[in-house]
Image (cartoon, rainbow, N blue to C red):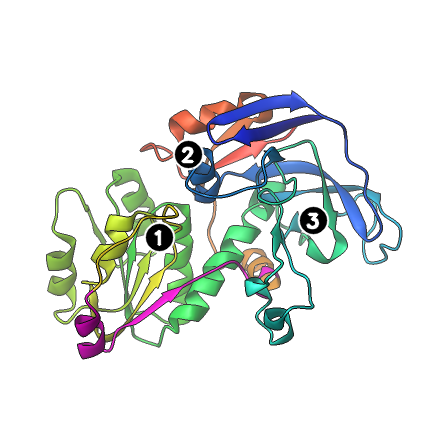
Amino acid sequence: MKAVVMYKPGDVRIKDVEKPKPGRGEILLKVKKSGVCGTDFILYHGAYYANFPIIFGHEYSGEIEELGEGVKNFNIGDRVTVDPNIVCHKCYFCKIGEEHLCENLITLGIHRNGGFAEYSVVPESNVFRLPDNLSFEVGALAEPIACAIRGIEVANIKQGDTVIILGGGCMGNLIMQLASIAGAANIIVSEPIAKRREIAEEYGASYTIDSIKNNVEKEVKKIKYCGADVVFECSGNSKVAELALHLARRGGHIVWFGVCPKGESIPIVPFDINENELFISGSFNNPYTQVKALKLLASGKIRTEKLVNPIIPLKDFNKVWRIFGESDTMRIMIDIK
């Protein structure tokens, strides 16, 4: 089968590799669509970790081709999407209901072969049936939406809140839509790319800010003089993560949702955090949120039609590194033929 193999950061090859076989409790999935995440991008640039060499990619959907021994809840031909995070169910964190923090976490596409391939083996527990009204393309967005739901849960948005989102790409847009569903009255999106600001406005942003031409802190305080109730950093940029500290009101909540490169740091003044009683949170993975994501997608409450662009055939995968983050891209999707 054809697969995209990362041998080390910066070394990605489209290869013919052996088609995998499902073991007990596993499913062989014929992959249809696979999204390119910001984590894949920083993995390529060496700012994240993986078990090299590896078939990477962790946002994908497809059709079941073969069932391993003992699989009872699915049938050949079922249309499904994947939660890439495999937990042990045995460690301290799993036993207290925080499986996403599992000490033995294995993630498809990072620790074990993932979805940038014609076929992928996935544990039955990590497979979710696609509702009939969802395409494979939309199904591949279920995992990022599940992660965005976790971010909303961490933020604890209250009815009438003012929320600012730093970064209006696919993930920032999803956070924006979910913040509206959660009850935010005013949602501000700060984004340097004009097309992304336009999509944010079309999908429900109350205000957008061109972060290149404007002082974001001043613009936010024009809208709410004391700062936002909740600030989401969705760009994965350390300088933007630092900016987030200056945009929240006293008693506000800052969620560092984007994945900044490992090893980078920013200055924090503990006195200011204490004096202003600021809450700072991370948001990691998608604990118990995959089903919620699929229900929201099936209901039509989450709009995705302009969030996927472009769609690239598997054979042209290495175009990704040239176009990732360009002005006319949102979520790059790989079409697996």
Mark drawn on residue 91? none
How far apart marks 1 and 2 lie (CA) works out to: 19 Å
Task: Tell me residue 236's x, y (percent).
Answer: 35, 48
Q: Label 3, label 1: how many angstroms apart (C-alpha)? A: 27 Å
Mark 1 or 2, closer to the camera: 2
- Give neighbour class at mark 1: few <14, some 14-19, many 20+ (Cα, 10 Å): many
Mark 2 nearby-residue class (10 Å; few <14, some 14–19, many ≥20): some
Q: Hey, what amino acid is under mark 1?
A: Cys
- Circle 3 is placed at which residue position? 80
In the picture, measured across the screen, residue 188 lies left or right of residue 87, that is left
Q: Position of residue 264 (x, y in %)?
A: 32, 48
Q: Are marks 1 and 2 in contact (CB under 8 Å)?
A: no
Of residues 121 and 183, the one drawn nearer to the viewer in this rendering: 121
Identify the residue at image location x=65%, y=68%. 91
Residue at label 1?
Answer: 234
Going 29% across and 72% down the picture, which residue do you hit?
161
Taking the magenta stretch, the answer to whether it contains residue 88 is: no
**Residue 73 image point, x, y percent:** 82, 58
Q: Nearer the viewer, mark 3 or mark 2?
A: 2
> Which stretch did the figure color magenta?
269-290
Position of the N terminus, as image quadrant, is: top right
Res. 281 visible in picture: yes
What amino acid is labelled 2 in the image?
Answer: His
Amino acid type of the residue tagged 3 in the rendering? Val
Residue 75 vertical placement versus 56 (above, below): below
What is the number of the mark on residue 45? 2
Q: Residue 55, located in which quarter of the rendered image?
A: top right
